[in-house]
């Protein structure tokens, strides 16, 4: 009789077939495009650019509203320039100097508050010169009081900035 010996039988796992990655195939893959433009590409690009250009022309011309705003800027700036000139030309002993300086400060503050936020004006020479002159005048009167005369050098520089601003205003700058 044959004895059955207890032998350990190793169970081997059955081989798992490797998982296949799905292969994507498309029948509608276009061949790689050539780098040179085809005639239809050129025509479609030129038609699109022409359409965009003709649609944007009204935006390139100044609108009547912006022309009115420019007229208002010129009018307000001319008024501030004349007020600065009259205030600077007053004699030190004139009893109305303090009132004129107060009016000038009010006019310059309202001018600066109105036009400083306008992005279109920030690059204009007239705006730059007027702003600088108003800053110098206001700074002097705040520091030294409304009856203190402006020194000759500072006064000459302010008047020169006023002249260049007027020239720039007349040229639309």
Image (cartoon, rainbow, N blue to C red):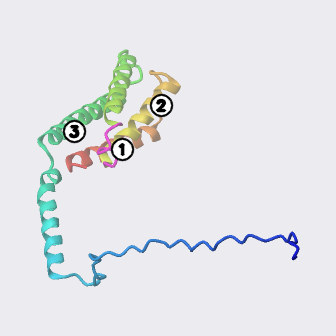
Q: Position of residue 77 (x, y in %)?
A: 26, 36
| Secondary structure mostly seen in the magenta stretch | loop
Range covered by the magenta-colored residues: 117-124
Residue 102 picture quarter: top left
User: Residue visible at 57% across and 74% down?
Assistant: 17
Mark toward the start of the polypeptide (3 vs 2): 3
Q: Is residue 123 magenta?
A: yes
Q: Residues within 10 Å of mark 3 (few under 14, many from 20)?
A: some
| Position of residue 112 measured from the top left corner of the image (x, y, whole percent) | 35, 32
Using the image as rendered, state which of residue 16 and residue 169 is in the foreground. Answer: 16
Q: Which mark is residue 74?
A: 3
Q: Nearer the viewer, residue 17 or 38?
A: 17
Distance from Cα at disc 2 to Cα at disc 1: 15 Å
Q: Residue furthest front?
A: 1
Q: Earlier in the sequence, mark 1 or mark 3?
A: 3
Q: Do the residues under discs 1 and 3 have CB atoms within 8 angstroms? A: no
Counting residues from the start of the chain, the first of labels 2 and 1 encountered is: 1
Q: Which residue is mark 2?
A: 139
Name the residue carrying label 1.
129
The quadrant in which the N terminus is found is bottom right
Mark 2: secondary structure: helix
Label 1's element?
helix
- Spot occupied by residue 126 in the image (x, y as percentages of width and height): 30, 45
The picture places residue 40, in percent across and down from the top left corner, at 14, 77
């Amino acid at each position: 009789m044959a004895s059955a010996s207890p032998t350990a039988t190793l169970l081997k796992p059955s081989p798992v077939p490797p998982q296949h990655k799905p292969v994507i195939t498309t029948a509608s893959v276009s061949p790689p495009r050539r780098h040179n433009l085809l005639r239809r590409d050129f025509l479609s690009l030129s038609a699109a650019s022409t359409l965009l250009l003709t649609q944007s022309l009204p935006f390139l011309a100044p609108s009547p509203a912006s022309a009115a705003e420019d007229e208002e800027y010129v009018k307000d700036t001319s008024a501030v320039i004349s007020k600065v000139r009259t205030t600077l030309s007053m004699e030190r002993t004139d009893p109305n100097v303090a009132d004129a300086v107060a009016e000038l400060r009010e006019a310059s503050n309202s001018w600066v508050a109105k036009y400083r936020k306008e992005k279109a004006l920030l690059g204009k020479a007239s705006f730059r010169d007027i702003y600088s002159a108003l800053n110098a005048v206001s700074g002097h009167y705040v520091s030294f009081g409304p009856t203190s005369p402006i020194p000759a050098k500072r006064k000459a520089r302010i008047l020169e900035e006023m002249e260049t601003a007027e020239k720039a205003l007349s040229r639309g700058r």
